[in-house]
Image (cartoon, rainbow, N blue to C red):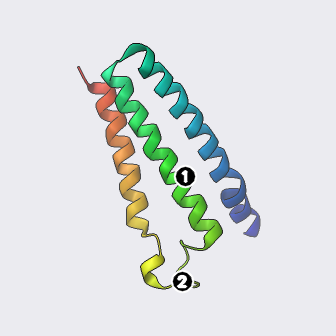
Amino acid sequence: MEDIEYLVQDILIPCIMILSLSLLIIAALSYRRTKNDKILVITIGFLCFFIKGLILSIGLYVGMLSSDSLPPSFVIPFDMLLFLDFLILLLLYFAVFKH
């Protein structure tokens, strides 16, 4: 079980951050070139995804996702991460179906 936790915490989260940052940069450059509103919405979606990765990384390495080591006021609520997922999907949905 520890191997799976290591895989998620130490390998997948940094990979997700690198991929989301790469897609954010590509989308931002594309928007700067085309000024297309759909690409702007996609760029904001990738920005939210990168911010979520930062929150996860900071939380894992500082202990903010664990209520064992810190007071409850410092714990990152799981609901906040779910809200970011919802926001990202909503932005991508509107980008795809925007006329």
Name of the residue lying farthest toward the right:
3
Q: Which amino acid does label 1 sit on?
A: Gly
The C terminus lies in quadrant = top left
- Expressed as whole percent of the image width and height from the top left, the position of residue 29 reads 50, 22
The N terminus lies in quadrant = bottom right
N-terminal label among 1 and 2: 1
Q: Which element is circle 1 on?
A: helix
Q: Which amino acid does label 2 sit on?
A: Leu
Residue annotated with mark 1: 53
Q: Is residue 60 above or below residue 8?
A: below
Q: Is residue 27 above or below residue 1?
A: above
Most foreground residue, 33 or 53: 33
Residue annotated with mark 2: 70
- Asked whether, in this view, residue 67 is left or right of residue 87, the answer is right
Q: Which element is circle 2 on?
A: loop
- Expressed as whole percent of the image width and height from the top left, the position of residue 93 reads 32, 34
Residue ID at (39%, 37%): 44
Neighbourhood count class around disc 1 (C-alpha, 10 Å): few under 14, some 14–19, many 20 upward: many
Name of the residue lying farthest toward the left:
99
- Expressed as whole percent of the image width and height from the top left, the position of residue 30 reads 47, 19
Residue ID at (66%, 57%): 8
- Asked whether, in this view, residue 24 is left or right of residue 77, the answer is right
